[in-house]
Image (cartoon, rainbow, N blue to C red):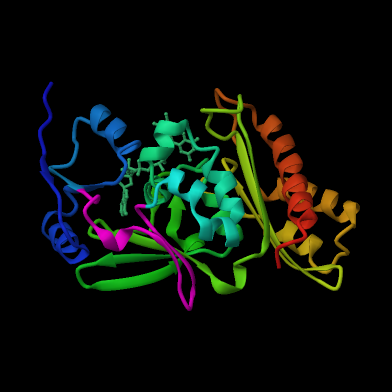
Amino acid sequence: MVRSFEYVVPGSLDEALETMKEHAPHLKPLAGGTDLLVELKNNLNGPQVVMDLSGLPELRGVEETSAGLRIGAMVTHTEIEKDPLIAEHVPAMMAAAATIGGVQTRNMGTIGGNLVTAVPSLDSGPVLLALDAQVTVAAAGGKRQLPLTEFFVGPRQTALAPDELLVDILIPTVMLGRRASFRKFGLRKGQALALVNAAASVAVEGGRIAEARIALGAVSPTVIRAMSAERVVTGKQINDADALREAAEVAVTEAQPIDDFRASAAYRRELIAVGTFRVLEEALAQTTAA
Ligand SMILES: Cc1cc2nc3c(=O)[nH]c(=O)nc-3n(C[C@H](O)[C@H](O)[C@H](O)COP(=O)(O)OP(=O)(O)OC[C@H]3O[C@@H](n4cnc5c(N)ncnc54)[C@H](O)[C@@H]3O)c2cc1C
């Protein structure tokens, strides 16, 4: 069966937002297409308009601003792996990007598409959550910024209105250079969706953990912060392995992993504990970052 749609390629963000205003909710933005093309193939009631975002310079690039590190929604996972500013300020993002699909998927797939698809196992999510990332979204009426925690609403559901585009992601200045780590557990090392993924960031002062963030993916309807586990380690000495073990146990109680064809909930609980311990341990072992 042939499913036809109009294909438009706006040349500026303003033009794109006007097009969305005119056609929402019957329009789908197209970034790298690694998720959307699968959806178009499988969905009989697909969009009437597909809007290619590749001509929008406003959605590209990584730059340092007075507010922090700005990452355009159209930045690909391969670009994240190779970007010098990301390497300098948020290397855990490179580690996460490197685990996404294969080379071809990373060459095409964008960070914006990953966040908007919003599957619970998305690999960009945990590090960004652990770094207090904000997102900028725009409609013809104007822009708004919101914390990434509020952007994820449910499995494959975000706070984007049908006429809104995700423009960029901001890592606040205070988080740049912060010790951070990412781990992904799959059924094999490459080309596997996460059974569980985890990230942590820590600020260290006088040999103690002054601030901690722990984020977990694939264990709840959205990526989550394990805030009770964060409280367990806050104020503890950086070499207090018992505190890390306790945080790992507490993190398990904050998640709601499910049984599915990839893994049992019980196995996922084991992975949450192991992952939480390791990302904290690895973040704390870093010496060069803030
Ligand atoms: C073989 C394969 C392996 C994969 N492995 C992984 C993996 O290991 N980990 C992982 O996390 N993901 C994985 N994915 C999923 C996918 O590659 C990523 O989610 C990717 O980042 C999606 O980005 P995209 O640019 O291709 O998005 P697209 O497919 O272009 O778009 C995805 C959705 O987001 C919307 N959208 C895109 N950009 C915007 C924007 N700026 N504003 C508003 N809406 C927007 C689109 O309309 C669509 O609904 C895999 C996919 C494939 C095909």
Q: Is residue 290 left or right of residue 281?
A: left
Q: Residue at x 71, y 36 (%)?
A: 271
Q: Is residue 251 visible?
A: yes
| Frontmost residue, 207 versus 4 | 207
Say above or below: 264 vs 144: above
Say above or below: 218 vs 176: above
Q: Residue at x 16, y 58 (%)?
A: 11
| Frontmost residue, 135 versus 45 | 135
Residue 242 in picture, x, y percent from top left: 90, 52
Residue 193 in picture, x, y percent from top left: 52, 32
The stretch of residues the image draws in magenta is 52-74
Question: Farthest residue in the front direction?
Answer: 84
Q: Residue at x 73, y 62 (%)?
A: 288
Residue 134 in picture, x, y percent from top left: 47, 66
Say above or below: 95 vs 90: above
Residue 136 in picture, x, y percent from top left: 38, 66
| Frontmost residue, 182 versus 176 | 176
**Location of residue 210 by image quarter:** bottom right
Residue 53 among those drawn in magenta? yes
Q: Is residue 115 left or right of residue 286?
A: left
Which image quadrant: the N terminus? top left
Q: Is residue 96 left or right of residue 110?
A: right
Residue 63 among those drawn in magenta? yes
Which image quadrant: the C terminus? bottom right
Q: Which corner quadrant of the figure contains ligand 1?
A: top left
